[in-house]
Amino acid sequence: MSDPLFTQEEYRKFDEGIAELLLHYPSDRKSAAMLPALRLLQTLKGWLPPEGMELVAQKLETHKEHAYEVATFYVMYHTQKPATYVIDVCTSLSCSLRGAEGLLAFLEQKLDIRSGVNGERYFLREAECQASCGTAPCFQINEDHFENLTVQKVEQILENLK
């Protein structure tokens, strides 16, 4: 038998959170709350387990496939349990012109992981624009944003993770 999705406390927070979200949407358009409902689930669990997405869909009176479609469209949602640190390196034009590919190669070597591979400690990914074109190159670690990166700055940031 598998573990339950939520602890009692998590389930209470989930129910209260969904109820609060639904106050902001018309009763005949509950599925419009999909983005914040998935965010709530991910905040509680650290990722979006399939049974959690199914529960979100039930609460929003839509199909579980709709929850999955939304969750897989946006990179901010994790449909697989992520590593401790998710590192999203912007490789869009401005960051590329300022050395993002070299930074990505440095991270692959330093962390001993390939981009796109979800490891136990690190999940290194290329990402689209992170809206820091004037302060490129940049990356995010989990939800912390870092700009004007150099190899030295990245080494210091990584050291602070330990």
Image: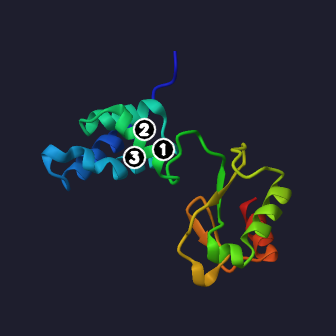
Q: Secondary structure at mark 1?
A: helix
Please state, as top left, top right, bottom left or bottom right, where the C terminus lies in the image: bottom right
Q: CA distance from mark 2 to mark 3?
A: 10 Å
Mark 2 touching mark 3, by CB under 8 A?
Answer: no
* Residue 38 image label: 3
Q: Residues within 10 Å of mark 1 (few under 14, many from 20)?
A: few
Q: Is residue 151 above or below residue 106?
A: below
- Amino acid type of the residue that numbered disc 1 sits on in the rendered structure: Thr
Identify the residue position indicated by label 1 in the image: 72
The residue type indicated by label 2 comes to: Tyr
Q: Secondary structure at mark 3?
A: helix
Q: How many marks?
A: 3
Q: Quick one: SS at disc 2?
A: helix
Where is residue 146, by image quadrant?
bottom right
Residue 98: where, in percent of width, then height?
72, 79
Residue where numbered disc 2 is placed: 68
Image marks 2 and 1: residues in contact by CB distance under 8 Å: yes
Q: Along the horizontal axis of the image, is 129 left or right of 125?
A: left
Which residue is farthest left? 27
Give percent across and percent down for residue 87.
Answer: 66, 58
Q: Nearer the viewer, residue 5 or 117?
A: 117
**Residue 4 x/y as whole percent:** 46, 26
Q: Nearer the viewer, mark 3 or mark 1?
A: 1
